[in-house]
Amino acid sequence: MSDAAAERGERIAKFLSRAGVASRRDVEKLIAEGQVKINNTKVTHPATFVTEGDLITVGGKLVEPAARTRLWRYHKAAGLMTTHRDPEGRPTVFEKLKDRLPRVISVGRLDLNSEGLLLLTNDGELARRLELPATGWLRRYRVRVNGNPDPQSLATLAKGTTVDGVRYGPIEAGLDSRKGDNSWLTISLREGRNREIRKVMAHLHLPVSRLIRIAYGPFQLGTLARGDVEEIPARVLRDQLPAAGRIG
């Protein structure tokens, strides 16, 4: 960092994201709600800069500078929202973990009825980086659908597909087994838009009845029990993410 950049400091949105308070987008919402202050003065713009020694509060609580970067694997159960606050009062991942982890945010999301591997981190910048399609990490799922998939239709998904005017990137989908009216598929993709798998499968007349994420990049669900959380060792994190902040 140049001397000029060091004197100017760091944007408040980036500072709070790295500190694990919220994503940059959610920080902007907090600022708009008047919840963010620097040295007891309300912040009005996410491009406001923070310098060493500034006191930053969110909702009246002091925010400490970012600690070392940490990452956890969590086995999310169906029926939980991946959000810090749900306006409908549904149970959330973070309520379940509030007494077991420091303040964390998720790397991407799993919808209410999806389950399996969810990565959690105390570093919002890391979460943002890992969510980007440019990172190239493959996300793999086991998916139960109602119906008998046509192998040729599944194969066409590798070229990308358009559903209701939305263009989705390449999806690798393979048939694993059939039992009665249900089939199990293994599905892999690199982007993962909101409810993408459910929408694409519905487009093929294969409604999803169960969706389990089993891998996100190099990190696997493995034998992690439902509801359990396990920190990824710093040495593994350094190997997989050599440029990710302060690790270990």
Image: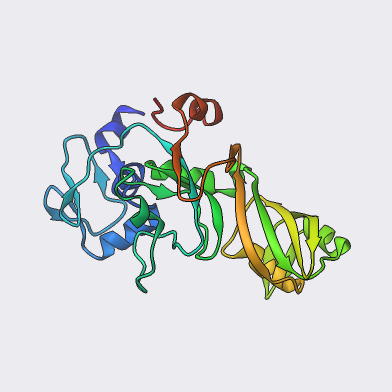
Quarter of the rendering containing residue 86: bottom left
- Would residue 107 be found to the left or right of residue 10 on screen? right
Among the 4 quarters of the image, the one containing residue 96: bottom left
Q: Residue at x 41, y 56 (%)?
A: 93
Residue at figure coordinates x 15%, y 43% from the top left: 55
Q: Residue at x 38, y 53 (%)?
A: 24
Question: 199 left or right of 93?
Answer: right
With 166 as the anchor, is 151 left or right in this view? Answer: right
- Measured as percent of width and height from the top left, residue 67 is found at 31, 34
For residue 49, side relative to residue 91 (left or right): left
- Residue 231 vs 33, above or below: the answer is above
How far from the left and from the top, in percent, is residue 175?
Answer: 80, 56
Residue nearest the observer in this picture, 147 or 243: 147
Residue at x-position 22% and y-position 44% = 63
The N terminus - image quarter: top left
Residue 42 in the image: state x and y as whole percent. 17, 57
Answer above or below: position of 229 versus 85: above
Q: Is residue 203 above or below residue 97?
A: below
Where is residue 118? Give x, y as percent.
50, 49
Image quarter hosting the C terminus: top left
Farthest residue, direction front: 180
Please tell me which residue lies in front, 31 or 126.
126
